[in-house]
Image: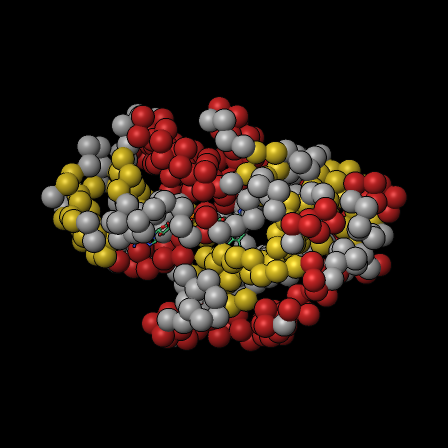
Amino acid sequence: MNSDRDGAIVIGGGIVGLATALAMAERGHPPIVLEAEHRLALHQTGHNSGVIHSGLYYKPGSSKARMCRAGLEAMYRFCAEENIPHRRCGKMVVAVRPEELPRLADLEERGRANGVAVRRLTPEEIQEREPEVLGLAGLWVEETGVVNYSQVSERMARRLAKLGGEVRVNHRVLAIRREKSAQIVETTGGLLRGSLLINCAGLQCDRVARLAAVDPGIRIVPFRGEYYVLRAERASLVRGLIYPVPDPAMPFLGVHFTRGIDDVVEAGPNAVLALKREGYSWKDVSLTDIADMAAFPGFWRMMRRQWRTGISEVQRSLSRRRFLESLQSLVPALTDADIERGGSGVRAQAVGADGRLIDDFHIQIVPGMVNVLNAPSPAATASLAIGREISERILAMRTAA
Ligand SMILES: Cc1cc2nc3c(=O)[nH]c(=O)nc-3n(C[C@H](O)[C@H](O)[C@H](O)COP(=O)(O)OP(=O)(O)OC[C@H]3O[C@@H](n4cnc5c(N)ncnc54)[C@H](O)[C@@H]3O)c2cc1C
């Protein structure tokens, strides 16, 4: 059996697991990171929009608001120190219908409450920045940026190794049992012993908690986000990041345009229920995952509440014309010939037994285990702050014990 030098084992080699491992290592307790796949960051961390979010959207006082703000600065610092290509390009939120104006004003107020420097844009100022966008009013957020989070994760792993930590890929956690004060972890790569487990397993986090006989109190429901990309010759239609005014009832931001760090312009993502936790297309179906969802009363409560949005998202997923229409509300000049199918990502969205989509980050601490049970967007932006918070809470508990 492999034993960890000081007891901490992080489960999941996405950006949250790596940032947490790094924070532990920086405080003198380098852990082992176990990753199921053959490479790091293959799931949410490697399938996102690559935006460094400013903290505009989140409820003031929430963990998301707080950690996005702290994480944003830490992320820019980390990228600069590690020479990771990134761009602090700013972003625009655009109201295109009169009924969106009050929501835009609410968003502006919320951004200010979170300490985000937000500026109002007139229709003329919108056009100066984005000539193809016809908006009634807009917000400009200077601090937003773009980066490739897979690259960030690789550098986190490298820094972790320098501090004495270790990453083991092809180590899927299959079973966990408790022996006195130790946790015995059975993986596809062998057995490990640790005194503390930090579960950052993303789309599988509720299952990993249950492996350790811990009730997570939530269930992960996977929501796929699908993208189109603008053909290279038409990418000039979009200069930067263009977002719609979000629906406050939903935790997703609405389909938007993102000129990434590679200068490819992505359009999306939508949000459709995935039929498999790692279901990147409609062809990916897992009967186990579907049965698991169906057995969870919270799933049916969620469906009762959100069925209208759900049907409309499925229609938009299956109809290229519907997707294009959503994009045209922001960039009317866009035509069918300008877009082609892009990639997709699957969000690990925690749902409560009452059917509510858990909005805030959710970290559960029980003896011998920390479970990160809801780390959706902006958790990539916030990862370094999440890692710092988890490590400080663990070390404070150890000192108190
Ligand atoms: C479409 C989309 C767009 C997004 N856009 C943005 C954005 O622009 N900006 C932003 O800040 N955030 C964005 N996000 C959110 C962001 O990507 C996630 O919040 C973040 O990547 C979560 O990281 P994670 O480490 O928790 O999860 P993951 O990256 O999913 O990592 C979890 C890891 O755990 C591993 N694992 C699972 N089960 C086991 C097991 N049993 N044993 C060992 N390992 C296991 C998995 O293989 C995986 O590598 C987006 C997400 C999606 C899906």
Tell me: 294 left or right of 232.
left
- Judge whether residue 116 can be spotted in this image: no
In front of the other: 325 or 224: 325
Q: Quadrant of residue 1?
A: top left
Image coloring type? secondary structure
- Residue furthest out toward the right: 124
**Residue 81 locus on image (x, y percent):** 48, 24
Quadrant holding the C terminus: top left
- Residue furthest out toward the front: 233
Residue at the image position 40 percent from the left and 57 percent from the top: 203
In front of the other: 294 or 330: 330
Tell me: 95 left or right of 67.
right
Residue at the image position 81 percent from the left and 46 percent from the top: 131
**Residue 201 locus on image (x, y percent):** 36, 51
**Residue 386 locus on image (x, y percent):** 45, 39
The correct choice, above or below, for 346 with respect to 184 in the image is below
Q: Quadrant of residue 117?
A: top right
The correct choice, above or below, for 159 with respect to 326 in the image is above
- Numbered disc total: 0
Tell me: 112 left or right of 374.
right
Residue at the image position 21 percent from the left and 56 percent from the top: 175
Tell me: 335 left or right of 149.
right
The correct choice, above or below, for 210 with respect to 6 in the image is below
In front of the other: 168 or 116: 168
Residue at the image position 26 percent from the left and 58 percent from the top: 211
**Residue 271 locus on image (x, y percent):** 57, 63
- Judge whether residue 149 can be spotted in this image: yes
